[in-house]
Image: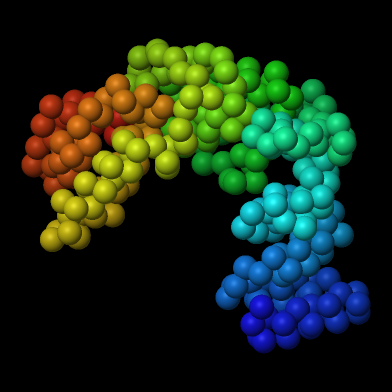
Amino acid sequence: MTTSSENLLKLARESQDAGNIDQAIKYLEEALRTETDPKLLFELSKLYEGQGNYWLAYSAIKHMPNYLDSQYQDYFFKLLAKNNFLIEALQIEANTDLKICQKYQIVAVDDRTQSQIMKKLRQKNITEEAYAQVLKLSLTNFKNFVRATLVDPTAEFALRISLIEECSKLRLDEQFSVLVDGQPTTFVPKETIHFLQEPLYLETLAEVNKLLVKDPSYKALAIASTNIILGALYPKLGDYVTDPKAFAKDIVGSVKHTSAGEHEELFQRLLNQYL
């Protein structure tokens, strides 16, 4: 920790002792603008927890690298319980030898609240905190919500991607139906790679960047188009992207309004649907 951060931590503790929690939080947030030291994040999390803001307390710990392997693991699991984040707890159990749901009494919220959560998640442009409410569902309601959303042609592609990845983290070994380019298909979450780690996505994005090295004015738009097009095709990229280099060339052509080659109709459909 830097000297500046140590001084701000000292001031935060003095403010806390004086009962000025809001000022203590400001000091810690200032320190965290320059470094993400686990001690600072833990102190901030404890202050939020003391205020009853379990979401922000959880978020602070999540900014720690390797928070599951740290000395703050026990505290983090207690925050999962206070947030009712059952789905995340089940994901941890699915990917580690840890058995935390029973030990920390991590349970879903009541049925009425779950119904309200699923209704709100269908709204457009939801916040990170609003999306995280999906973690409060029971496993049965979570899977039912995912199944309904993935075959809903009006669902936002970002929500679709996030839900598919949540299922992947749960290592669900069962088929899910999903609409891709308006066509029904299936996938198995346990066998599905996360979108940003998908090799076809990474290869296509790299090729797009190569093609625009000498023409950077189109780069931001081309990257945005790449994310939308490939995001809309996820988790079935392999059915559409057989040659990342050619696919990238057509994306750049579409952005420059020259030629999108054989993919022109596909790109128009996807961009019209999600823009």
The N terminus is located in which quarter? bottom right
Q: Quadrant of residue 267?
A: top left
* Residue nearest the observer in this picture, 203 or 215: 203
Q: Residue at x 40, y 13 (%)?
A: 184
Residue 245 lies in quadrant: top left
Can I make out residue 54 in this image? no
**Hey, which residue is sitting farthest left in the picture?**
258
Question: Residue drawn 16% across and 30% down?
Answer: 264
Where 69 sits versus 45, above or below?
Answer: above
Q: Is residue 226 visible?
A: yes
Say how many tags the image has: 0
Q: Is residue 57 above or below residue 1?
A: above
- Residue at 16%, 51% in the rendered image: 211
Q: Nearer the viewer, residue 97 or 171?
A: 97
Q: Which sits in the foreground, 185 or 51?
A: 185
Q: How is the image coloured?
A: rainbow
- List x then y, in percent, for residue 239: 30, 21
Expressed as whole percent of the image width and height from the top left, the position of residue 237 reads 33, 28
Residue 181: x and y in percent read 33, 21
Residue at image coords 26%, 41%: 204
Instruction: Identify the residue at the far front of this view.
Output: 97
- Looking at the image, is 64 positioned above or below residue 85? below
Quadrant containing the C terminus in the rendered view: top left
**Side (left or right) of 34 relative to 50:** left
Residue 195 x %, y %: 43, 37
